[in-house]
């Protein structure tokens, strides 16, 4: 793990609601401790982006609500009340160490639009160059079901991909991923390292729910799947452990380390693979899957065996192998109607079938992001 941290320059740190809040509101001690550690790391030459939960939890406590509202307007109102107080405390905590903070509230549709995605990326890079700490949260006050990230674990993964981060650190209220919920089962065992996120890992995570936050351990595993498939490592660690960030960067092993793929995914492919909502599915045979996964080839019509959904040229579409496992997402050169006509054909046959041939490839490799964990 020390080797991993020796090559780290840009870090995304996500802090969960259960770390930042307590029964009577914000946990100021936790906010000040995490802020102090971040400032220490910045002074050591690192660039830090902070994804912070807590706004809705703070609002719920401040308003005296018995639980998180079930309806979206109630959640939006609670977040609106809580966000101001959360940022005020961050500003005060970082000011103690002569650091400035900036608030960024994002929605999912803002990152699915390529221009807004690049604008957000440029803003974050500028803030980092100014030595300002971005404090990022989902914009709960305007989000609705269709556009919300759903949880800040997912948001933190998208920010890590957006900014080409070197590592994502997810601070929560337990020490890492366990074989069972350690708050309930004394015999639960910590899993120190995960090299591949398989179904058993998701099973462990699914049995460990969250409390104040939206997600539990499963949303953290989904975030780990995103970033590791793009070549970025992730750690889940206990956020209230004394000096946890400083100890991690000094080489101590804490929590659960998720091993990334060896090759980093290009930023544009991260956008395609993790920010666009697929509009359909293309089913491919194992020969095409091998060509894409092992040889970096484009998807040709000859390897397509089925199409689900209706979509136009340029749409983001998932592609699956013969076992219906998701391999990735790509931008198509042909509509679903035309793909139905040319699937199984050689590229030399496209023009006779459609009357014209605009591309040889249904999905060009430059517009294709491999995001699945499965092997052919």
Image (cartoon, rainbow, N blue to C red):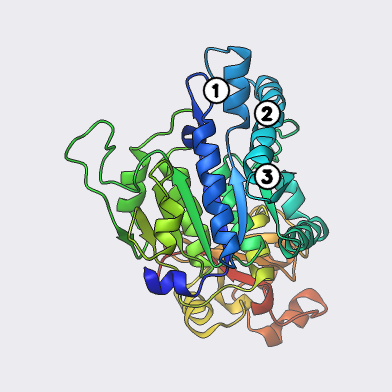
Q: Quadrant of the C terminus?
A: bottom left
Determine whether 209 is above or below 247 in the image: above
Q: Which residue lies furthest to the left in this view?
A: 187
Residue marked by disc 3: 95
Residue marked by disc 1: 25
Determine whether 226 is above or below 237 in the image: below
Q: In which quarter of the image is the N terminus?
A: bottom left
Q: Can residue 252 be seen in this view?
A: yes
Mark 2, Cα crowd under 10 Å, few <14 / some 14-19 / many 20+, is some
Is disc 3 placed on a helix, strand or loop?
A: helix
Q: Is residue 261 visible?
A: no
Q: Do labels 1 and 2 touch, CB within 8 Å?
A: yes
**Residue 353 image point, x, y percent:** 74, 76
Task: Give the camera-side residue of 14 and 35.
Answer: 35
Displayed quadrant of residue 114:
bottom right
Displayed quadrant of residue 367:
bottom right
Distance between mark 1 and mark 3 Cα atoms = 21 Å
Task: Give the camera-side residue of 286 and 112.
Answer: 112
Mark 3, Cα crowd under 10 Å, few <14 / some 14-19 / many 20+, is some
Is disc 2 placed on a helix, strand or loop?
A: helix
Distance between mark 1 and mark 2 Cα atoms = 10 Å
User: Residue 182 shows which numbered tag?
Assistant: none
Residue at left 68%, top 56%? 276
**Residue 264 image point, x, y percent:** 55, 74
Q: Earlier in the sequence, mark 2 or mark 3?
A: 2
Is disc 1 placed on a helix, strand or loop?
A: strand
Residue at left 70%, top 33%? 144
Q: Earlier in the sequence, mark 1 or mark 2?
A: 1
User: Residue 85 shows which numbered tag?
Assistant: 2
Distance between mark 2 and mark 3 Cα atoms = 15 Å
């Amino acid at each position: 793990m020390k080797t991993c941290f020796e090559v780290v320059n840009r870090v995304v740190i996500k802090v969960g609601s259960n770390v930042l809040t307590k029964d009577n509101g914000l946990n100021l001690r936790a906010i000040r401790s995490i802020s102090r550690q971040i400032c220490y790391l910045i002074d050591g030459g690192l660039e830090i982006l902070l994804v912070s939960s807590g706004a809705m939890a703070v609002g719920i406590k401040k308003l005296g609500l018995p639980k998180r509202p079930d309806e979206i307007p109630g959640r939006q109102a609670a977040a609106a009340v809580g966000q101001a107080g959360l940022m005020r405390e961050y500003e005060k905590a970082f000011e103690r160490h002569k650091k400035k903070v900036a608030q960024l509230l994002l929605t999912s549709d803002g990152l699915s639009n390529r221009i807004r995605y690049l604008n957000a990326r440029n803003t974050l890079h500028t803030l980092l160059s100014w030595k300002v700490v971005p404090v990022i949260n989902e914009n709960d006050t305007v989000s609705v079901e269709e556009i919300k990230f759903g949880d800040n674990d997912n948001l933190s993964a998208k920010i890590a991909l957006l900014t080409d981060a070197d590592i994502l650190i997810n601070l929560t209220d337990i020490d890492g991923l366990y074989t069972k919920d350690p708050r309930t089962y004394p015999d639960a065992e910590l899993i120190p390292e995960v090299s591949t996120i398989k179904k058993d890992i998701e099973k462990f995570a699914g049995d460990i729910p969250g409390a104040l936050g939206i997600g539990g351990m499963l949303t953290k595993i989904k975030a780990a799947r995103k970033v590791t498939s793009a070549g970025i490592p992730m750690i889940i660690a206990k956020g209230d452990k004394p000096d946890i960030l400083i100890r991690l960067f000094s080489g101590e092993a804490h929590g659960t380390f998720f091993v990334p793929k060896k090759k980093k995914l290009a930023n544009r492919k991260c956008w395609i693979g993790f920010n666009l909502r697929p509009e359909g599915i293309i089913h491919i045979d194992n020969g095409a899957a091998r060509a894409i996964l092992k040889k970096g080839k484009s998807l040709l019509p000859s390897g397509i065996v089925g199409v689900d959904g209706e979509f136009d040229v340029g749409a983001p579409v998932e592609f699956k192998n013969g076992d219906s496992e998701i391999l990735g997402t790509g931008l198509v050169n042909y509509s679903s109607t035309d793909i139905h006509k040319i699937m199984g054909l050689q590229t030399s046959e496209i023009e006779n079938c459609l009357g014209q041939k605009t591309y040889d490839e249904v999905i060009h490799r430059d517009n294709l992001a491999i995001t699945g964990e499965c092997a052919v």
